[in-house]
């Protein structure tokens, strides 16, 4: 590896996480319409979606270096997403999770 390539690699690895994540594709996110339908059935897909959501939020928390989840329990997170998806059926759970993250961060910082 040349010095120039090594310097580029080091520079990229030092970028803040949001700059790298801007063009990221979120895998596993379901549409809000599917979230609502599967939660009503309370089937294996609902459990899978709920597990994905908790993992995604945990990853956002670790990746951002902010403990925005704090003492939030899973039931509260799922209730929030139920409401969000009921109001935004054409969006997806990744969008909802990011909105929840922002809301929780604002509550924790008081801003």
Image (cartoon, rainbow, N blue to C red):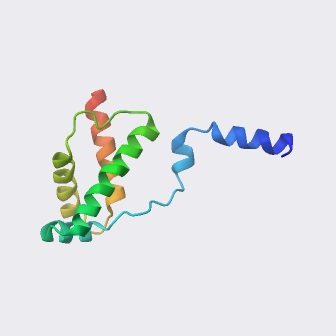
* Horizontal side, residue 20 vs residue 11: left or right: left
Above or below, comparing residue 60 to residue 48 in the picture: above
- Where is 49 relative to 108, above or below? below
Asked if 79 appears above or below 7 in the picture, the reply is: below
State whether residue 53 appears in this view.
Answer: yes
**How many numbered circles does the render carry?**
0
Q: Is residue 101 left or right of residue 3?
A: left
Observer-nearest residue: 29 or 32?
29
Query: Where, quadrant-wise, is the C terminus in this rendering?
Result: top left
View extreme (front): residue:
44
Pick the residue in front: 109 or 56. Answer: 56
Place of residue 50 in the rendered image (x, y in percent of width and height, measured from the top left):
25, 57
Q: Residue at x 49, y 60 (%)?
A: 25
Residue 110 in which image quadrant = top left
- The residue drawn where x is 23% and y is 68% is 44
> x, y percentage for residue 86?
18, 63
Q: Residue at x 22, y 55 (%)?
A: 81
Q: Furthest-right residue in view?
A: 2
Rendered location of residue 61, percent (x, y): 38, 40
- Visible in this render: residue 96? no
At 18% from the left edge and 58% from the top edge, which residue is drawn?
A: 82
Q: Name the side, left or right, on which 24 lies relative to 51.
A: right
């Amino acid at each position: 590896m040349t010095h120039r390539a090594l310097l580029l690699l080091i520079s990229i690895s030092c970028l803040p996480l949001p700059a790298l994540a801007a063009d990221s594709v979120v895998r596993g996110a379901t549409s809000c319409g599917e979230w609502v339908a599967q939660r009503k059935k309370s089937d294996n897909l609902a459990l899978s979606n709920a597990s994905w959501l908790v993992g995604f939020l945990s990853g956002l928390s670790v990746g951002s270096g902010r403990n925005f989840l704090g003492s939030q329990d899973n039931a509260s997170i799922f209730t929030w997403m139920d409401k969000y998806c009921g109001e935004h059926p054409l969006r997806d759970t990744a969008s909802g999770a990011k909105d929840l993250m922002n809301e929780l961060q604002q509550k924790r910082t008081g801003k």
